[in-house]
Image (cartoon, rainbow, N blue to C red):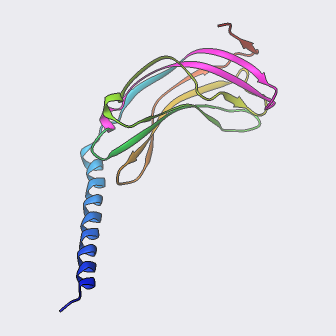
């Protein structure tokens, strides 16, 4: 006859094995059953400020953008949250690739999965440490990171748009 400790160990091991199998099936079912990707668009609305930040010795820019996106296709039973963010990427002579996150949002429920933002201001300024921001072509990208309850995190691009930064420093009056 087996002891109580051995019986408890057998029950626990069977429970963990079943839990692992069902978690793997849950993660795989998302890849098989959901094929749609979210749709959306992003557009730079207005550059509010392009100035020299003397504290950081860098160029700094503030902007507003319009965002329209529907994340309902990726909201399912295995979605823990979506980390949405907007990046501004550009090239300079000092750094070949510059990518700055200017806005982010954590989407946790399907009720907020349809987003329509107008004249949304960036949360984080766009800065260039070598003062080479003026006159550059910038690409705004709406991206999201899918964070499932079980499975691998994945990163996707929803929409992109490009614009040119002005050549001179300025600041709009409110």
Q: Is residue 162 above or below residue 77?
A: above
Is 88 positioned to the left or the right of 10 in the image? right
| In front of the other: 173 or 146 | 173
Task: List the single residue furthest toward the top.
Answer: 173
Is 59 included in the stretch rendered in magenta?
yes
Query: Which residue of the protein is positioned furthest toward the bottom in this rendering?
Result: 1
Residue positioned 76% across, 15% down in the render = 169
Magenta residues span: 45-74
Residue 115 versus residue 97: which sits nearer the camera? 115
Give the residue at x 77% y 37%.
Answer: 94
Q: Is residue 84 magenta?
A: no
The kind of secondary structure the magenta stretch mainly shows is: strand
Query: Is 126 left or right of 169, judged from the image as shown?
Result: left
Q: Position of residue 42 (x, y in %)?
A: 48, 23
Q: Quadrant of residue 98?
A: top right
Q: Quadrant of residue 79?
A: top left
Q: Give residue 154's position: percent from left, percent from top.
A: 43, 47
């Amino acid at each position: 006859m087996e002891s109580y400790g051995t019986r408890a160990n057998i029950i626990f091991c069977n429970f963990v094995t079943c839990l692992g199998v069902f978690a793997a099936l849950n993660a795989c079912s998302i890849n098989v059953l959901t094929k749609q990707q979210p749709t959306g668009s992003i557009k730079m609305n207005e550059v509010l400020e392009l100035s020299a930040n003397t504290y950081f010795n860098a160029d700094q820019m503030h902007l507003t953008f319009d965002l329209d996106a529907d994340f309902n296709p990726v909201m399912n039973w295995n979605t823990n949250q979506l980390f949405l963010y907007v990046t501004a990427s550009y090239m300079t002579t000092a750094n070949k690739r510059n990518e700055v996150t200017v806005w982010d949002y954590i989407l946790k429920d399907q009720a907020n999965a349809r987003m329509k933002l107008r004249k949304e201001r960036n949360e984080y300024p766009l800065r260039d440490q070598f003062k080479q921001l003026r006159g550059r072509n910038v690409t705004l990208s709406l991206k999201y990171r899918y964070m499932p309850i079980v499975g691998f995190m994945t990163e996707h691009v929803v929409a992109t748009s490009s614009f040119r930064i002005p050549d001179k420093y300025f600041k709009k009056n409110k």
